[in-house]
Image (cartoon, rainbow, N blue to C red):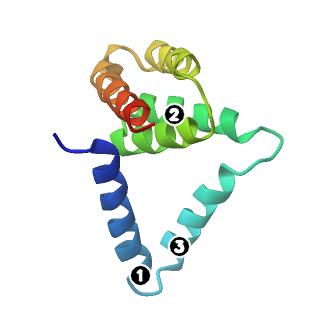
Amino acid sequence: MSDIVKDFNDYRTKMNDKILGDGNNKIIKRIFNLDTNAYAEGALDVKTKELLGLVASTVLRCDDCIKYHLETSYNQGLTKAEINEALGIAMLVGGTIVIPHLRKAYEFWEALEAQG
C-alpha cells in the first residue's frame, strides 16, 4: 500500500519547485508568498487559521488543499475531534456534494495518525 502522506508531499514539493523555478512569473510567486503569510500567527492563531482553511477547502472541494490543511493541522496539534467538528461545518455549508471529499479527508487523517 502506498504512503498517501509521503506521496502527496513528494508530489507537492516537486511540482511547487517546478512552478516557482519556471521563469520570472511574479504573480505566481506573490500568490504563493501571500498564501504562506496568510496562515502565519496574527490576530487569529495558526490553529484557527488552519481550521478556516480546511473548511473553505472542503466546501470548495479541493482535495490537495484539504490534505495540506489536514497535515498542517495535525502538525499544529489539532485533535481528531477538532477536525471532525470543522468538517461537520464544512458539510453543513457545502452540502452532500462534500461527502466524497470527507471520505478522502478521513483517509488522509488516518494516514497522518498512523505515521505518528
Residue 71 circle label? none
Q: Quadrant of residue 112?
A: top left
Q: Quadrant of residue 63?
A: top left
Per the image, label 2 sits on a secondary structure element best described as helix
Residue 29 circle label? 3
Residue 1 spot, x, y in % from top left: 16, 39
Q: Which residue is mark 2?
A: 54
Q: Which residue is mark 1?
A: 21
Residue 17 spot, x, y in % from top left: 40, 73
User: Which tag is nearer the camera, tag 2 or tag 3?
Assistant: 2
Chain-order first, disc 3 or disc 1: 1
Chain-order first, disc 2 or disc 3: 3
Residue occupying the point 45% across, 45% down: 68
Which amino acid is tagged 3? Answer: Lys
> Residue most toward the left?
1
* C-alpha distance separating marks 3 and 1: 9 Å
Which amino acid is tagged 2? Answer: Leu
Per the image, label 3 sits on a secondary structure element best described as helix
* C-alpha distance separating marks 2 and 1: 27 Å
Which amino acid is tagged 1? Answer: Gly
Chain-order first, disc 2 or disc 1: 1
* C-alpha distance separating marks 2 and 3: 22 Å
